[in-house]
């Protein structure tokens, strides 16, 4: 989101902007911990990592926007 859009939203009297806090639930933190531990175990056992958890760098020739 561009800063000017956020500024417009914040300036509206009928709008409340809040942060996303879903990752702070007990269930979410448990899932994050389990996923992290499993990824570490898989990595050190030489197993392929779950591609849903893999962060991929953009191609080097791609320009920043």
Image: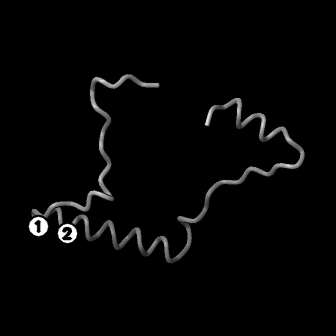
What mark, if any, has residue 41 been given in the picture? 2
Question: Pointer 2: residues within 10 angstroms few (<14), some, or many (20+)?
Answer: few
| 61 vs 16, nearest the viewer | 61
Secondary structure beneath disc 2? Answer: helix
Q: Is residue 7 positioned above or below 63 on the image?
A: below
Secondary structure beneath disc 1? Answer: loop
**Quadrant housing the N terminus:** top right
Q: Residue at label 1?
A: 45
- Residue under the point 33% across and 25% down: 62
Locate residue 25: give its quadrant: bottom right
Q: State yes or no: discs 2 and 1 in contact (Cβ < 8 Å).
A: yes
Residue 51 spot, x, y in % from top left: 27, 57
Determine the residue located farthest toward the left in the rendered image: 46
Question: Pointer 1: residues within 10 angstroms few (<14), some, or many (20+)?
Answer: few
Horizontally, is 3 left or right of 34 in the view? right
- Residue under the point 65% across and 54% down: 19
Q: How many labels does the image show?
A: 2
Locate residue 11: give its quadrant: top right
Q: Distance between the residues labelled 2 and 1?
A: 6 Å
Residue 30 spot, x, y in % from top left: 43, 75
Residue 14 spot, x, y in % from top left: 88, 49
Q: Is residue 28 positioned above or below 9 on the image?
A: below
Residue 18 spot, x, y in % from top left: 71, 54
Q: Is residue 61 positioned above or below 21 on the image?
A: above
């Amino acid at each position: 989101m561009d800063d000017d859009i956020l500024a417009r939203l914040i300036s509206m009297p009928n709008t409340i902007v809040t942060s996303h806090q879903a990752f702070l639930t007990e269930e979410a933190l448990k899932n994050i911990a389990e996923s992290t531990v499993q990824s570490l175990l898989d990595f050190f056992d030489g197993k392929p990592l779950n591609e849903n958890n893999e962060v991929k760098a953009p191609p080097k020739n791609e320009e920043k926007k």
